[in-house]
């Protein structure tokens, strides 16, 4: 196959981060989801069907994506890194945007790109002295509108409603109005403005990162997106039961703390269906924002020299294994969509089944832009899979608290508290509902040393 890898004349990068987006999109095989803009992008991308984040929570997942490294498993991973840099730590490797900035790029962040939606801690998550990613951004932007602060944006519903006490805020909502009545409308407007400015500079390439908050809880979108699902049949939950034996099952506390009108989707199927539809509406709302940004990219003419990446920061269980939320090491918690597109890409729109991990994206983008690759990343470039969808993948590593997991083609191995092992066979109908470690000791002995070697690599602050 002809190698049509981009030449090294510094292509732009548009990186779209979408919060809590599971790979339930039409382009990933979910016929019931309305996602026309992401699907159109997929038609011009490499579709990664088996991309796994390194941790099933916003903070540590984005840490790994943005640094190419395995880090702390708690949500303040990037804050710890930022604080260490602010305190004078010298040996911390550069983040992805910092690396591109060092190599001549204008780097701009809009919306939730790192863990906190403004990339800043402190009061209202808006303190310039509490950066999650020091030295990374030329411009670091977060419009807040009537929600008042980045913290208000993060947990906002329509017309400036902000989460105070979660039990007083509805877990889902739809409201009449245009896209600007929810926070992501403002983020998208600012992203379009920045894209217009960046595309006018013909001398300096740009790295524009845009973080869209929905479908993060609480699920909220304009009514027109919920209307898309009137009469649409949703597929059955294939694994509705709480696991037996060792697992990373949890009580769905993030979801359950909101006002649910005294209903529980684990036991109330009618309510579960409503939750799934509101999640889908939030996905369609996020998809519309993607469409507006890509339209501006094309109208600016910068699309002819821009690599586009779309990534979900982790999965989200909609009842699988009796979990409503993330924070677990099941397939549904770790698998998320990844699209990579660039001009003149071979085999446009073809999907790859190669197993890859989020830490791989950093070295892949340096390879695609012709920049030197940092020696500090734990991930591996997946440019071979970008160019040729038939190329095989490698292990994908994940972690949560004291539990660690390794995914390879066909199997997942999970190590609980450093002692107990579960092996799941993805070639079987049971998949992650049955531990087959006793039946396949040879696979356990193959995967376990690799898993333990990855466990030793974590950054500590």
Image: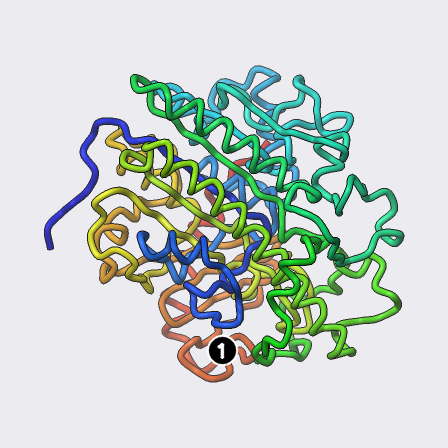
Q: Is residue 189 above or below residue 2?
A: above
Q: Which of 284 and 47 is in front in this view?
A: 284
Return the residue nearer the eye: 151 or 384: 151
- Camera-nearest residue between 193 and 338: 193
Number of numbered discs on residues:
1
Position of residue 20 relative to residue 317, above or below, is: above
Give me the residue at 20% from left, 30% from top: 8
In the figure, is residue 165 to the left or right of 82?
A: right
Say which quadrant the N terminus sits in: bottom left
**Relative to 285, is 89 above or below?**
above
Q: Name the residue under label 1.
A: 431
Say which quadrant the C terminus sits in. Answer: top right
Question: What residue is shown at x 51% (from left), y 37% (from top)?
Answer: 210
Residue for point 37% across, 55% down: 42
Expressed as whole percent of the image width and height from the top left, the position of residue 86 reads 60, 18
Q: In this view, does 32 lie to the left or right of 447?
A: right
Looking at the picture, how far across and down is residue 384, in whole percent? 23, 50
- Residue 428 placed where, x, y %? 44, 82
The answer to which quarter of the image holds residue 150 is top right
The image position of residue 182, as x and y in percent, is 69, 44
Question: Can you name the residue that lies furthest to the left here?
Answer: 2
């Amino acid at each position: 196959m002809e190698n049509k890898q981009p030449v090294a004349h510094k292509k732009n990068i548009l990186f779209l981060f979408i919060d809590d987006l599971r790979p339930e999109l039409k382009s990933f095989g979910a016929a019931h989801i309305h996602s026309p803009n992401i699907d159109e992008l997929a038609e011009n991308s490499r579709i990664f069907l088996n991309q796994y984040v390194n941790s099933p929570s916003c903070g540590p997942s984005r840490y790994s994506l943005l640094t190419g490294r395995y880090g702390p498993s708690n949500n303040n991973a990037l804050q710890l890194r930022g604080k260490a840099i602010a305190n004078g730590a010298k040996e911390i490797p550069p983040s992805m945007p910092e690396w591109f900035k060092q190599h001549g790029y204008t780097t701009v962040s809009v919306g939730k790109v790192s863990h906190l939606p403004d990339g800043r801690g402190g009061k209202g998550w808006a303190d310039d002295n509490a950066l999650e990613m020091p030295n990374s951004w030329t411009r670091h932007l977060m419009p807040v509108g009537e929600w008042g602060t980045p913290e208000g944006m993060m947990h906002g519903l329509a017309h400036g409603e902000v989460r105070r006490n979660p039990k007083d805020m509805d877990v889902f909502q739809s409201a009449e109005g245009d896209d600007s009545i929810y926070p992501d409308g403002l983020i998208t407007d600012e992203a379009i403005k920045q894209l217009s400015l960046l595309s006018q500079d013909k001398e300096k390439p740009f790295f524009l990162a845009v973080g869209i908050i929905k479908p993060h809880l609480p699920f909220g979108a304009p009514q027109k997106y919920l209307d898309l699902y009137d009469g649409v049949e949703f597929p059955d939950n294939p694994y509705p039961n709480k696991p037996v034996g060792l697992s990373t099952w949890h009580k769905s506390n993030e979801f359950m703390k909101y006002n649910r009108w005294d209903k529980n989707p684990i036991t109330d199927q009618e309510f579960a269906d409503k939750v799934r539809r509101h999640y889908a509406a939030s996905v369609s709302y996020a998809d519309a924002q993607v469409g507006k940004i890509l339209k501006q990219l094309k109208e600016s003419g910068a699309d002819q020299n821009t690599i586009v990446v779309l990534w979900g920061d982790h999965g989200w269980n909609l009842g699988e294994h009796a979990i409503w939320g993330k924070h677990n090491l099941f397939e549904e918690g770790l698998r998320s969509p990844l699209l990579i597109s660039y001009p003149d890409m071979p085999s446009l729109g073809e999907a790859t089944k190669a197993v890859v991990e989020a830490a791989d994206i950093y070295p892949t983008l340096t390879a695609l832009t012709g920049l030197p690759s940092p020696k500090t990343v734990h991930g591996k470039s997946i440019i071979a899979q970008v160019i040729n969808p038939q190329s095989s993948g490698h292990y994908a590593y994940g972690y949560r608290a004291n539990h660690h997991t390794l995914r390879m083609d066909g199997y997942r191995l999970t190590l609980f508290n450093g002692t107990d092992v579960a092996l799941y066979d993805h070639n079987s109908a049971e998949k992650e509902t049955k531990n087959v470690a006793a039946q396949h000791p040879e696979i356990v002995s193959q995967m376990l040393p690799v898993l333990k070697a990855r466990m030793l690599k974590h950054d500590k602050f």
